[in-house]
Amino acid sequence: MSDLNKLSLAEARDALRNRDVTSVELTEACLKAIDAADVLNAFVHKTPEIALERAKAADERIKAGDAPAMCGLPIGIKDLFCTKCVPSQAASKILDGFKPEYESTVSQQLADAGAVMLGKLNMDEFAMGSSNETSVYGNAVNPWRRGNDDAQLTPGGSSGGSASAVAADLCLAATGTDTGGSIRQPAAFTGITGIKPTYGRCSRWGIVAFASSLDQAGPMTKNVRDAAIMLEAMCGHDPKDSTSAELAVPNFEAMLTGDIKGKKIGIPKEYRMDGMPAEIEKLWADGAEMLKAAGAEIVDISLPHTKYALPAYYVIAPAEASSNLARYDGVRYGRRAQLAQGDGITEMYEKTRAEGFGHEVQRRVMVGTYVLSAGFYDAYYNRARKVRTLIKKDFEDVFAAGVDAILTPATPSAAFGLGEMTEADPVQMYLNDVFTVTVNLAGLPGISVPAGLDGQGLPLGLQLIGRPWEEGDLLNTAYALENAAGFVAKPGKWW
């Protein structure tokens, strides 16, 4: 079999079971693809020795007939997940040299299932960004290009390295994290599938925290079936995470029937934004028609507090970040600034944090510290929390009225060029999250499915939002949408 790195998880799993291929062969094909794609800057810490060791062990397990679905499948791990004795920097200078002595729960569960870690993937620093331009490793690059234009495009963020690696077939799948859209937006920008599960479905233990009440890990894969396979391996109760749900994990793949007859799909009127590109508007309408043709009932719904979601998110997330990032002070681990004669502990903190954090992280820590400060706590933070409750209630009311899933665009545009959104106006960048942040604020599951190309040949995604804890049902609706859309386009290889 040639081009083994281009297989989906399901295809590779079946080939391994049939003994058509070995995990070592799959892994070597991916390692070769990774080494030939340095220009994409997707993998930032390569771990070929660990990969081949795990691949050999997986082959033994498969031979012995003791192999879960993920056994022997080569994947990438976002740099936000702590991986034992492997650099885990969250793409920040301040964690330079940090090699944890422990493994995050999610990456451990994947390892226990026999998955093969190829290395760590690029991302925005501390997961703060929508374009992968805030990374200490430099920009990750989207494998897609606009027509014959050579301009480098963003793969989205913060899970930009994960999206780029999966889209370019450097790995069969990758882990991502999503705080305000960081799995779904990059998935849409690169023509892959990305699901953010219900808050509490995947353990957050050992994942470097950005905003603890919003962060969730999830898989980034080549299609919906792969997302179901990998999500099952990532989920499960973890006593080390107090927000982890003690719920049984269903066989998500077995729920992919493609039958959505009688399902009610809501179309929220508040997501029709001023200035939305006609291509996104058309894609959304086409998606609704596809679901209708598959037997679903399309209903108009209202989520009245949507317009407050972005402002509420950009108060709550930085507030939690300023609290979470206080631990990075140069004392116990990570990088410490060079001190001058006579400098005390205060100067050490100041210099370490000023040198160690990039501009976007500094900006969000400052915003977060401001909204939590005396005199502003009630005016900003408490008010944002109340708005969050109202946004959550909007969704609860819609689901109580019998709606099974909600269809929206995933992003307000296709991938933009690196450097096109200048740092001069960070709000422009924040607007990229306009369709995704509500899902995090309400703790709901959301999935981005590639559904078409824009006029310049770039992928566009549609988002489905599901009921809490019903990822299986959501994946099945996404599967029906994927089948109807028939998206099979891949980026032309230029790297």
Image: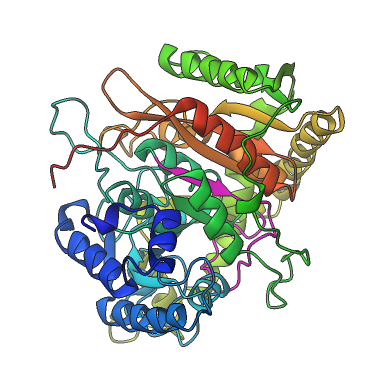
The residues colored magenta run 192-213
| Image: 344 above or below 218 | below
Q: Which residue is drawn at 55% across and 45% down?
A: 180
Q: Is residue 314 left or right of residue 304?
A: left
In the rendered image, the quadrant that contains the N terminus is: bottom left
| Image: 169 above or below 455 | below
Residue 308 on image: x %, y %: 66, 30
Q: Which residue is drawn at 82% across and 36% down?
A: 396
Q: Main secondary structure of the magenta part?
A: loop
Q: In this view, does 472 lie to the left or right of 455?
A: right
Of the pair 146 and 334, the residue shown nearer to us = 146
Q: In this view, does 373 lie to the left or right of 109?
A: right
Of the pair 57 and 405, the residue shown nearer to us = 57
| Image: 384 above or below 274 | below
Task: Report if residue 295 lies within the magenta region.
Answer: no
Res. 45 visible in picture: no
